[in-house]
Amino acid sequence: MARRTKVGNQVIEAWKRTVVNEYCNGHINSERSLQALLFSNLRAVFAEDETERRIFVEPTVQLPGAGVIGPDIVICNSREAICFLELKFAPRAKADTKKDMRSISSVARSEGISILLKRYRGPDLPSMKFAVSKTVLFAWAGIHAGSTEPSKEWTDPAFQGHFHLELHATTNDGQAPGERYNTNALHVENSPIEA
């Protein structure tokens, strides 16, 4: 079974670029700017790898029979949602993950989703219905001053049998952020981020 190694490594590469080139140079001042710059770096990494992906930032996601959620980033191939990514920007504080994890755990309980383009007003587009891949990667990424221990939220039964990835950039005064990855999907090495 595919473990989403390719998209996981692409997310890690885009995250490293975002932290080193954007955060360490003072270009990120909010979670919105973190979203925008990570989106840009994801597009660049996908283009370099010649990988076709659709990236949605804060889409309205309709869950069958369970309402709507707004994850920070959803990555899809032509048929399936393959990665749901929640972000946190709290460089001076401990990042609270409970709300983010509840949001993506509701996806883990779903079979399919619809991406709603409520604010779109242009030429007709094909339906934005995607299956949730059986090998979907649930990811959380944060620039924060808290712990890098694996989140206890991954033990929620909703995540049973799913792959996850945590990307931490921990901040300290006068130093580049430390990096840490916690995952059950791919092999990663944890080391200081080189600014």
Image (cartoon, helix red, strand yellow):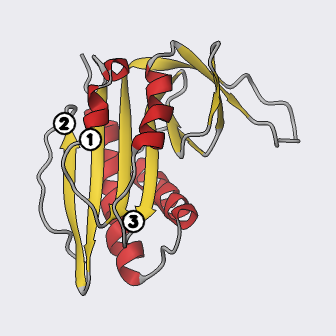
Q: Give the labeled residue for mark 3.
A: 18
Q: Amino acid at mark 3?
A: Thr
Q: Amino acid at mark 2?
A: Leu
**Quick one: SS at disc 3?**
helix
**Quick one: SS at disc 1?**
loop
**Quick one: SS at disc 2?**
loop
Q: Residues within 10 Å of mark 3 (few under 14, many from 20)?
A: many
Mark-to-mark CA distance, 3 and 2: 20 Å
Q: Amino acid at mark 1?
A: Ser
Q: Identify which residue is drawn at 56% across, 15% down.
A: 112
Mark-to-mark CA distance, 3 and 1: 22 Å
* Image quadrant occupied by the C terminus: bottom left
Q: Give the labeled residue for mark 2.
A: 186
Q: Identify which residue is drawn at 29% across, 51% down.
A: 167
Reply above or below: 141 against 85. Answer: below
Q: Residues within 10 Å of mark 2 (few under 14, many from 20)?
A: some
* Image quadrant occupied by the N terminus: top left
Please provide percent x and percent y for residue 53.
50, 38
Q: Give the labeled residue for mark 1.
A: 151
Q: Identify which residue is drawn at 29% across, 31% down.
A: 154
| Towards the viewer: 93 or 124 | 93
Q: Identify which residue is drawn at 46% across, 33% down.
A: 102
Please provide percent x and percent y for residue 186.
19, 36
